[in-house]
Amino acid sequence: MDKFKIGFIGMGRRGDYWLHGCILAREDVDLRWICDIDSEKLEAASAKIAAKGFNPKATTDFHDILKDSEVEAVIISTDWESHIPIAIECMKAGMPVGLEVGGAYSVNDCFRLVHTWEETGTFFMMLENCCYGRTEMMLLNMARQNLFGDIVHCSGGYCHDLRNSLARGRELKHYRLRNYLNRNCDTYPTHALIPIFKLLDINNGNRMVSLYSAASPAKGLMHYSKETGFGTEDILPNGAMHGDVVTTIIKCAHGETIHLNLETTLPRFYSRDLSVHGTKGIFTENGDSFYFDNIPEHHKSEAHKDFYGNIEDFYSEYDHPLWKKTLKEGVTGGHGGMDGLVLSAFAQSVKNGWESPVDVYDAASAMCITALSDESIATGMPVGIPDFTNGIWLCRKEKEKTLYSL
């Protein structure tokens, strides 16, 4: 078996999850290097990996990986601040990049990422696992068959109670805490946004043109810290800046709207809050429900007399071919199999010279929402969204058709 030889940069919580929830469980991946600037994290990761029978080289300097001619690609799972700088250096060295998700700190950084890819041609993919969620891929399959008609609005979000890990940020050495103490914006837009890109052909015949963001007061983390005693040294003196609920409304070139919601510091269940609104029908994740014009009675769910909660009925008919294949062969990787599928897409694209399923234009367009929402919240004004493709979006529509034929 010709294994995919990779180096892994960033051994924090997400990096640990990647390795033990996906990479080390696969026979087609050869982990050659691990890297972290924190030597304690690196040693702990090395010990855990060795206990599973693997022995990659370890370094605190990712440049060591770039010097290894046998490494085929790197995965970057560091703090958000270093995502783009490391990705740029890797591309300049000719090393294919798989970049973990997160927002950008400036629009300029996003342009630097795009220009580096355009200058080097080095393979780049944002590892947005939610593009490969079973529901997201079924919705894409249905949209391609025109079941929703003209899609006029989509919503999505990252709604996840992170209070415990945020409050213990110093103990866990978690970069999220310093962002919540000092920033007020949508720090994590890509899980919702990039699957919506595929539904609305963003950067492939359509684009986002402007946004307006607003944030609620930041009270949830302070309340949690007082109640539990966690994070008192960091959170209680000055409180957090990051609003408990951050709302963003985006306008697209063809008039469609996108609603993004970030809610991570209040008690709640997990949701990506996905919905699709079209001229022929609607889907809403909160309720797992479809409704269409002239929907047959047999699509009513068993649990309800109406059509609420009827998603399972649609899986049987509209599951994406990739998920049909995955369910037949066996689901692997964390987050319900999404991690395994995005890793496979990355490996196959690099090895076969395919175009990136989530390319640098998608990454820059999604990551810039963090910086632009920061500006909009601070000024109370809408802001324009740059065209990172420099007009190429007008003639790229056919490319998107092949993104999931992996």
Image (cartoon, rainbow, N blue to C red):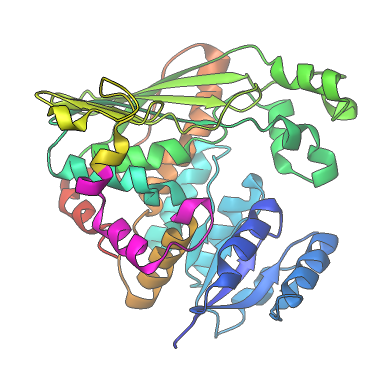
Q: Residue at horizontal 69%, vertical 33%?
A: 179
Q: Position of residue 66 (x, y in %)?
A: 60, 75
Q: Nearer the viewer, residue 87 or 72?
A: 72
The percent position of residue 187, horizontal first and vertical second, equals 57, 33
Give 238 or 230, whichever is nearer the viewer: 230
- Quadrant in the picture for the C terminus: bottom left
**Position of 295 compared to 351: left or right?**
left
- Determine whether, in the image, residue 1 is placed left or right of residue 294: right
- Magenta: main secondary structure equals helix
Total count of labels:
0
Magenta range is 315-338
Q: Locate residue 309, reporting x and y percent.
A: 34, 29
Choose top left, top right, bottom left or bottom right for residue 40. bottom right
Res. 353 image quadrant: bottom left
User: Please, is residue 397 above or below residue 41 in the view?
Assistant: above
Where is residue 338 drawn, in percent x and y?
45, 54
* Residue at 43% from the left image edge and 36% from the top image edge: 192
Question: Would you say residue 237 is visible in this rendering?
Answer: yes
Q: Which of 397 and 94 lies nearest the eye of the viewer?
A: 397
In the rendered view, would you say 146 is above or below 20?
A: above
Q: Residue 210 magenta-drawn? A: no
Figure quadrant of the N terminus:
bottom left
Evaluate whether residue 394 shows in this view: no
- Can you name the residue that lies furthest to the bottom here? 1
Vertical position of residue 295 compared to residue 98: above or below: above
